[in-house]
Amino acid sequence: MPGYGSLPGIFSSTITPRKILLDESLSVHGDQIVLDSGNTDSGATPTHRMRPGNVVIKRASTGRYVEANDTNADGLTAPAITSSSHADTTDVIALVGNHGSISVTVSTGTGTEANCATDLNADADFAAFYTASSAAGELTITANRGGADEWFYIAAATAAGMGFAEGVDNYVSGADPDVRVVCEAGDLQDPDGTAQHAPATNLIRGYFDESQLINLTGAAKEVLSRRGSIFG
């Protein structure tokens, strides 16, 4: 009988079992996601088959998921608030947030938005957690770090004088990207060798063996931890 080693479509594949969970009691599965065709797993054979334990993040612009350390992955979003032109040039700007209460007296020069930003950034307590900037007659205050646990608002007593909205609209919070841990993925290459997007089952929370997770970044670990994940 003729040999079959040269038949088209026959290839070598190595699949190594990976135990990514230390305990399944915390596991929460997410809806099926779609992995972007541009992903590769350098530790897999072939590299277009992503192993369980790959940490991926949604790229909002495409709706598909890329490796957590991909520069195209969405990141932690920092909260920010922007004022309109202010009327009172000597106000104290009082912020209340997850880093506590901070008050800064604005007194530089003519009190323009640019000068307000200068005063705020010169204050050590403010600068430790926030950055102020100005453009087009508006003052913007942005938290130095992002994530769903970051929030702040301008205290009502000083908000109006500096052109910030009062009340609930004055509250801003950060946001987390959508992080998943791959359990099983489809093939990112079709039989003809052309890259293709592929579905993947995944976890959004679990008791993970960190040594078995691939491309886990600090930000991704932070998000998974906020969801109740544990790493061992």
Image (cartoon, grey):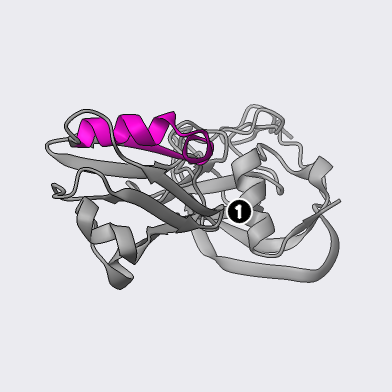
Position above or below: 158 against 12: below
Residue nearest the viewer, comparing 227 with 127: 127
Secondary structure character of the magenta stretch overall:
helix
Residue appearing at x 30%, y 71% in the figure: 167
Residue 53 appears left or right of 80:
right
The quarter of the displayed image where residue 196 is located:
top left
Circle 1 sits on which residue?
223
Q: Is residue 63 visible?
A: no
Q: Is residue 162 visible?
A: yes
Residue appearing at x 34%, y 47% in the figure: 62
Residue appearing at x 20%, y 37% in the figure: 113
For the N terminus, the quadrant is top right
Q: Where is residue 97 in the image (x, y as percent from the top left)?
A: 49, 57
Q: Where is residue 182 in the image (x, y as percent from the top left)?
A: 64, 52
Q: Position of residue 149 (x, y in %)?
A: 55, 58
The quarter of the displayed image where residue 157 is located:
bottom left
82 inside magenta stretch: no
Residue nearest the viewer, comparing 20 with 201: 20
